[in-house]
Amino acid sequence: MEEQADAESPASEDLPDGVPVLDHEEAFEAGLALILGGLEQHVAAPDAAR
């Protein structure tokens, strides 16, 4: 996945109005943080299936 995040970003002038330029490495790290946060909540939640 990190190799995919290293793809060239379009120049800001090539993007439509209102579309922000994203730092791919920052976005990758933020995505991982969201996944880990969800896993932490899932593991911390009481087991409702029993």
Image (spheres, grey):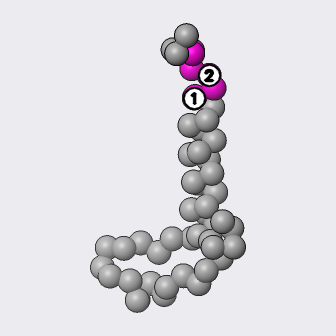
Identity of the residue furthest to the front in this view: 50
Q: Percent from the top left, x then y, of residue 2?
A: 68, 67
The residue that appears at 36% across and 73% down in the rendered structure is 19
Name the residue that disc number 2 marks: 44
Q: Amino acid at mark 2?
A: Ala
Tell me where residue 15 sits by quadrant.
bottom left
Q: Is residue 44 above or below residue 7?
A: above
Give the side of residue 20 with respect to residue 4, left or right: left
- Considering depth in this image, is 9 or 38 the residue closer to the camera? 38
- The question of residue 49 being in magenta is answered with no
The residue that appears at 44% across and 84% down in the rendered structure is 12
Q: Which label is found at residue 41?
A: 1
Q: Amino acid at mark 1?
A: Gln
| Quadrant of the rendering where the C terminus is positioned | top right
Q: Is residue 11 above or below residue 35?
A: below
- Considering depth in this image, is 28 or 17 the residue closer to the camera? 28
Disc 1 and disc 2 in contact, CB within 8 angstroms: yes
| Quadrant of the rendering where the N terminus is positioned | bottom right
Q: How dense is the environment of label 1, judged by Cα within 10 Å: few (below 14), some, or many (20 and up)?
A: few
Q: Which label is found at residue 5?
A: none
Q: Which residues are magenta?
A: 41-47
Q: How dense is the environment of label 2, judged by Cα within 10 Å: few (below 14), some, or many (20 and up)?
A: few
Give the side of residue 5 with respect to residue 16, left or right: right
Q: How many marks?
A: 2
Q: Secondary structure at mark 1?
A: helix
The residue that appears at 59% across and 70% down in the rendered structure is 24
Q: Percent from the top left, x then y, of residue 4?
A: 63, 73
Tell me where residue 42 sits by quadrant.
top right
Mark 1–mark 2 distance (CA, rounded to whole Å)? 5 Å
Identity of the residue furthest to the right in this view: 3
The residue that appears at 64% across and 57% down in the rendered structure is 29
